[in-house]
Image (tube, rainbow, N blue to C red):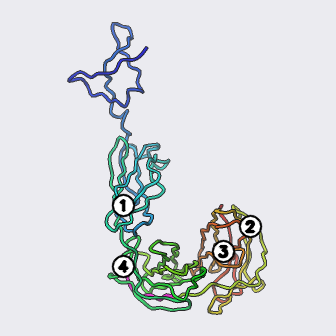
Amino acid sequence: MKMPDCVAPPGSPRYYPGMRAQLTRFVPLAGALLWGAACVDVPEDFVRPKVGSVSIIAGQSQVTTIGSDAVPPAIRLLGRDSQPLFGVEVRYSVKNAGASVFPTNVRTDSMGVAAPRVWTVSGTPGTDTLVAVVVGVGTYTFLATVTPPCAATGAIAVNDSINGAVTAAGCLTNGGRRAVGYTTQNVPTSLTYGVTLSMRGSTYKGRLELQRFGVPVATSSFDTSTAIPNRASVIAFLPGTGATVLAMAELASATGPFSLVSVGNPVVSGCEPNVFIAPGALTTQASIDANACTITDQNGAVYYAHRYTIRLATGQRMVARMSSTAIDPYLLVIDGNGNVVAGQDVGTISSVAVDYTAPAAGYYTIAGLSTRSPRATGGPYIISVDP
């Protein structure tokens, strides 16, 4: 038997059509239950999430360069009991041509947070707008200032050392940081060239970014301890053309002088694989000593290292970590041809991590070493690989 449609007469209580498929509509009449076409007055709590508060926790009022991935917008919903609301739908949409967001429909997780994975801004300088509709609750707007890529004001070649300064007049880059840009010189055009870039600010924590045609391809970590508190470094393969090095402060409001050093690809020698390590594994070593293999940088400095071999499939990602309370950890990833393809050095007693995705299947090397002088000794330390 087909149920009749509900038609609310004038002056009747408010009816919520969204509940039509969820309620069995019976009308009591003379002690019996009969099918009826009367409207049902559904309490508002049945159709609206019982939201106590809505807060924006990421992605609002940011600065990023054209065509880049902005910080994804994130919204947290708490109930009237201040507990996270799970499963509330949030619909995201962009308002600028050339921009995109993925996925467009997200539900809050166990922490009450809903966020898409990627928000790519448009290729036009200006203000990009993203709208988030919390179904049954309200609409929230996110804004991103989209800037042109930083133009280089100087050049840097391998083994160059440059003194400069981050000022309020510098170009604006991701996160609202002021930066100074340098184009790379003397890089072979037929192949990529490994280079280590180290920066030290005198009054702030440094940050380095490598861009190609305005698109970031590598970003440094920065040192948060007191040993070398204002240093940052990055290792990457630079393309022959179109590469720009950006020197900046980690904090958007920081300015001041810096020194920037470009050092060529380290040379690995005498490093026979001594340990095979698999994704998900963890190993603890007592020390790095003079019996280890050596890694020599372009300035002739020699580092002693332990070498680990791992097999990766095409497109397989790994995150290698090295931690120690006794040495200054330094991690390198080396491909099957002996080329250093990734690395990280924060220059202090700490821990480092390298996130690397293999472009081709094969055996790769993870080299763990210490930058503390004397470089022949150090330990213990832990190396692990997250799959």
Which residue is at 36% across, 56% downward?
Answer: 130
Q: Are marks 1 and 2 in contact (CB under 8 Å)?
A: no
**Could you tell which of marks 4 and 3 lies nearer the N-terminus?**
4
**In front: label 3 or label 2:** 3
Q: Secondary structure at mark 3?
A: strand
Q: Residue furthest top?
A: 30
Residue 18 in the image: above or below residue 339: above
**Residue 372 sits in quarter:** bottom right
Q: Depth check: 179 or 282 in front? A: 179
Q: Residue furthest left?
A: 11
**Could you tell which of marks 1 and 2 lies nearer the N-terminus?**
1
Mark 4, residues whose alpha carbon is within 10 Å: few (<14), some, or many (≥20)? many
Quadrant containing the N terminus is: top left
Residue behind mark 3:
333
**Residue 274 sits in quarter:** bottom right
Which residue is at 38% across, 11% downward?
Answer: 34
Quadrant containing the C terminus is: bottom right
Q: Position of 221 compared to 152: left or right?
A: right
Start and end of the magenta stretch? 255-260
For the residues labelled 3 and 1, the Cα–Cα distance comes to: 35 Å
Inspect the image, locate mark 4, and give the three-letter code of the amino acid beneath it. Cys
Q: Secondary structure at mark 4?
A: strand
Q: Which mark is residue 171?
A: 4
**Could you tell which of marks 4 and 1 lies nearer the N-terminus?**
1
Residue behind mark 2:
277
For the residues labelled 3 and 2, the Cα–Cα distance comes to: 13 Å
Q: Secondary structure at mark 1?
A: loop
**Could you tell which of marks 3 and 2 lies nearer the N-terminus?**
2
Inspect the image, locate mark 3, and give the three-letter code of the amino acid beneath it. Val
Which residue is at 42% across, 66% downward?
Answer: 67
**Could you tell which of marks 4 and 2 lies nearer the N-terminus?**
4
